[in-house]
Image (tube, rainbow, N blue to C red):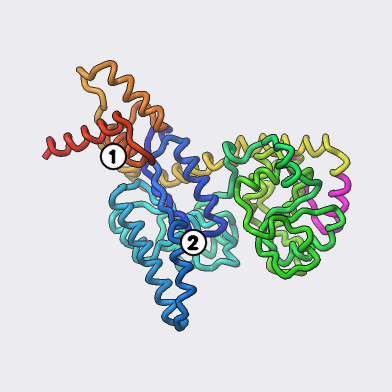
Amino acid sequence: MNKDKVLRILVVLPLYGGSLPVGRFCVSALQEMGHIVETFEAPAFYDAYNALDDLKVTSDRYQYLQNSFLQVLSQAVLAKAETFEPDLVLAMAQAPLTHQALKRLRRDNVKTAMWFVEDFRLFTYWQSFAPFYDIFAVIQKEPFFSELNQIGVNNVLYLPLAAHPDFHKPVELTPMDMRKYGGDVSFMGAGYPNRRMAFRKLIHHNLKIWGSEWEGDHVLEPYLQLGGRRVTSEECVKIFNGSKINLNLHSSIQADELISGGDFINPRTFELAACGAFQLVDKRSLMTEAFAEGELAFFDSLEDLDEKINFYLSRPQERKNYAEKARKRVLKEHTYTSRMQTLIDYAEQSFSEWPKERNTDNIFGQDFPEELKKEIMMLIEKLGLPATVGFEDLVTAVRAQHGELTTLDTAVLFLDEWKKTYNK
């Protein structure tokens, strides 16, 4: 696709969960690419959704109210789409979009995509929702592709996770932050059974554990940071940069399966690399497609991990070599910008006459004042739009801004209203 082509993309975030920060990075990447992006902020409704828990009603009424609440959110997404007129609705995993809403978007010829950034074996709701999306992007390959094909879903795109280099980057920690977030060996993530079993045997490394869902583990409790609360994305970057060795053990619900040998690559792998941080990671079957030999340091058993922690703690230069190579690879191939471009290219190849043509009237007429032209061009640059943007897309971008409108913003919107009246 022509990189100067401006798209309107509506990103639908989930109420909560692991795909929420992924969705926010997608929004940032699309904006940096010069597209006009609107976000459906489902998390703004999370407290109201949780308030249903306190009603003390029967389970069937509770289920009914939950479904009704999600129906309202879906209707809100439809209302936003009707107003914004997007070229693409990008829904993150567990976004509040019902079958009825997706049918309505398809009927209105609005293309939809879901980025299913979850393990298809554990989260099986894809069986119900995948057929309703025009594009179903996933982080696994076979046998997931075949299982999707069996239910009639052929519009499948392999789209692994990524990092956002403007956010995931090397940072110099203050002495105070270094005391709080720094350390020899750390792990950031949820307390899955395999991690609990593994880390009980690694606490002699003065291990720091960050993240939630570690309750009830008295052995690991003294090593749990921040009281076991969820760690923000900003704190993650500090932890990654402050740790000599970042442990990256992919999750498994089987306590006796410490190294699962699974397929998908978690976001932490890319984020750590983008931060220029050293990591010890368990090898996944899709790793060889994403990283070359010598770019990541792997372990294949608990005993191997224990030995390699000792080995690399005393070898800062080797840690640095790995970190630099991994960061270079991620910046080249594994950013959210590159993922969003892959998604857009796939949509263009899959759908004829997509995106639909919009009004691309030249903003500047023959007698347009030169001084005002400079101001408009400065506004276009501020909004991150290409110089060739049409007037309709400029108006949409101005409306999408937050905060108080400038005099020039107001003038553009006034001109739009005048043109609509005049055309009638």
Q: Of the residues tagged 1 and 2, which is closer to the observer?
A: 2
Question: Within the image, what quadrant is residue 182 found in?
Answer: top right
Is residue 96 found left or right of 182 in the rendered image?
left
Q: Which residue is mark 1?
A: 357
Is residue 213 found left or right of 343 in the rendered image?
right
In this view of the protein, can residue 54 be seen by the observer? yes
Residue 286, given in percent of the width and then of the height, sits at: 66, 51
Q: Main secondary structure of the magenta part?
A: helix
| Callout 2 amino acid | Gln
Image quadrant where one finds the C terminus? top left
Query: How many labels sit on residues?
Result: 2
- Residue at the (74%, 54%) spot, across then down: 282
| Callout 1 amino acid | Glu
Magenta-colored stretch includes residue 59: no
- Residue at the (67%, 48%) spot, across then down: 269
Classify mark 2: helix, strand or loop: loop
Residue 313, given in percent of the width and then of the height, sits at: 85, 44
- Residue at the (53%, 65%) spot, across then down: 147
Q: Which residue is mark 2?
A: 94
Work out whether residue 7 or residue 417 is closer to the camera in this orientation and state it: 417
Q: CA distance from mark 1 to mark 2?
A: 31 Å
Is residue 347 found left or right of 75 in the rendered image?
right
Magenta-highlighted residues: 295-312
- Crowding at label 2, few (<14), some or many (≥20) Cα neighbours within 10 Å? many
Residue 2, given in percent of the width and then of the height, sits at: 41, 33
